[in-house]
Amino acid sequence: MAGRVATRVAAAPPGGEGRCKVANRLAGETSPYLLQHADNPVDWYPWGEEALARARAEDKPLLVSIGYSACHWCHVMAHESFENLAIAGLMNELFVNVKVDREERPDVDHVYMTAVQAMTGHGGWPLNVFCTPDGTPFYGGTYWPPEDRGRMPGFPRILQAVAEAYRERRADVEQQGVALREHIAQAMAPALPRGELDPRLLDQAVEVLSSSFDRRYGGFGGAPKFPQPMTLEFLLRRYHASGDEQALAMVEFTLDHMARGGMYDQLGGGFARYSVDERWLVPHFEKMLYDNAQLSRVYLHAHLATGKPLYRRIAEETYAYVQREMLDRAGGFYSAQDADSEGHEGKFYVWTPDEIAAVLGPEDAALVERYWGVTEGGNFEGRNILWVPRALEAVAEEAGVSPERLEAAVARAKRELFAVRSQRVWPGRDDKVLTAWNGLMMRSFAEAGRLLGNDEYLRVAVANATFVLGNLRQGDRLLRTWRNGEAKLSGYLEDYACYAAALLALYEATFELEWFTEARALADTMLDLFWDDALGGFYNTPRDHEALIVRPRDFYDNAVPSGNSVAVDVLLRLALLTGEAAYERRAVQVLEGLAHAMGQHPLAFGELIQALDFHLAGPREIALVGEPEAADTQALLAVVNGAYLPNQVLALRRPDDRAAEAAIPLLAERDALDGRATAYVCRHAVCELPTTNPIVLAEQLNLTPPAPLP
């Protein structure tokens, strides 16, 4: 990797503190993040050919600035620099300036984040990258202040130095760009040794995770601490498969501490993005749809696996939060809520003792302040983030009241403090609808509807599927984003994969054939648009997508699972339901290509290693024949839905439903015995005897048999 382009810093321009508001080219965009910058004095362009053409015509470098609407430091830099007349003037004079919403354009973000990480050793948002007119990066970083601060140069110095390097040392700039392009290309398609899919990889992954587990507070690593729901799902699977108590202990310890922490909204439900500290106390207050989709699902599964009511409560409170604050009337889920309100991070969520006492009165206030760790000095900038540092029983004993009395006081406090909090200035909300993130959330609602027997959750899931397929699809192609009635941008691999996975989950919850049919159609389109035989995997962008400096590919699971990982899961499930070996063959190619990496670095492959676990487990294929609403069918479904069964596929048809039999070969040649609902359980191409008896079905699934029917 070549070194950075040398920069010479000139004096920063004096003054320039003025602000003005004149609509720029972003005013016609739908992204809330881009619209936040529509009144900047910066002559912003959205990403596209118009900006690149101007850069070529004027021989100016591009400044590509990437962020998202809920990003705290993006807001800080916008206020300090992009609203500053003098700094904006420098930007307009020296560069063609491009604003990118990373959530709308993950391809652009991925390419330039890879470049900045190569140059600086770290990344984050705001992401500011300087490029040649063809989009090749040559210098970049994250946040820069508006003036020099200690050893950190101010943004004006950076602007002047980069522009000077581009004018006067073009050969160095171009050499740096060539080196970066080569690095990015190698990072997108590394030459990894193919590995055997050995079950010992799963045990190795558990050992690696155990070595980084925080035995004091839960989670993995130190501060800042991220929730890692995909990793927790994998560990829960390992406990289910092998009885590994260590794996279960890591899951429960982490889920317990996260549920009690300030990262979880103790009044309104839902999780913030991550914890600034190792104790889960101080969150980065933004709430993202994808976190709440994945965390609600892992708490749901943990409840099924352990029976602990706490986990069900957290899942249900998170679903309630999403329904209340993140659901569009049309059926789509919004993307995020901001960390800031009234210009201050977390102001919406924090409390003083006096504020609590004013709402609850002195007696109940004293109780709940003990429970939520509230003090006069506070735990966040002189105020209090509500959290649960000690068990309710211990607090009740110390306060000299019964646990029931304290529990009642907390329940009342939640209602009344939430009502008062609702009168505050709310954090901003990013109300765009992203297909991939909607897939993550819809899948969780569909599974909760099935596993908890909750028809309202199923209604939300069906409404979302109807909305997405009706508004974010053109022909057989998905679109990426929708807001205020306008859908646009070609869908990415993660959009197809996440939504196909959600539709399969919705099929298993409703047994409506259209959801299976739509899921398979999306998977087939996904293979056509994104698969590459030479690569043995998927690219992030379709084959006819606009050309970037490289075609991006992402196989690591980050805050959102990679499209490759979810695609593997979808293909493995479709292979079992349809009997089509081609689906499994493609999935195995991806798994083999990343086998070694998964075992050594499981935190980077939380979703993909679950797909490996699914593949190696020899999933059960459960086919039911019966009338869905009939009592005998419901008795069989109660066995399947009442247990944690991660490695299975489930299909059902009515006895006379030939369309389902034709569409899902797993259902072919299955008959209802003696006119009664019948279950067929197969594994490794070997089938158990069909049964109409729920007790026998439980035994075939290695479950504790249910009580006999009266």
Image: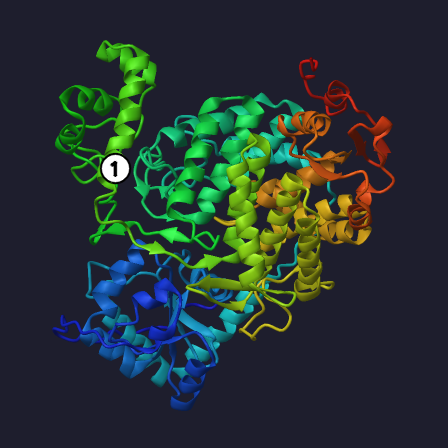
Asked if residue 190 lies left or right of residue 457, the reply is right
- Where residue 267 appears, as percent x and y from the top left, is 31, 34
Looking at the picture, tell me which residue is in the foreground, 609 or 646. 646
Residue shown at the point (35%, 85%) measured from the top left: 167
Name the one closer to the observer, 439 or 256.
439
The amino acid type, in three-letter code, at marker 1 is Ala
Q: Is residue 395 left or right of residue 107?
A: left
Residue 59 found in image quarter: bottom left
Quick one: SS at disc 1?
A: helix
Q: Is residue 48 above or below residue 401?
A: below
Q: How is the image coloured?
A: rainbow
- Graded by Cα atoms within 10 Å as few (under 14), some (14 to 19) or many (20 or more), the crowding at tag 1 reads some
Q: Is residue 223 above or below residue 239?
A: below
Nearest the camera: 495 or 94? 495
* Residue found at the very far bottom of the displayed protein: 57
Q: Could you tell me residue 385's position as x and y percent?
A: 25, 35
Q: Quadrant of the C terminus?
A: top right
Instruction: Determine whether, in the image, residue 415 is placed left or right of residue 200.
Output: left
Pointer 1 residue: 419
| Residue at 81% from the left image edge and 38% from the top image edge | 655
Image quadrant where residue 411 sits: top left
Residue 525 in the image: x percent, y percent?
A: 68, 62
Asked if residue 439 shows in the view, the reply is no
User: Does residue 363 sit above or below 214 in this rendering?
Assistant: above
State whether residue 682 is above or below residue 72: above
Viewer can see residue 329: yes
Label tally: 1
Query: What residue is drawn where x is 77% and y is 39%?
Result: 654
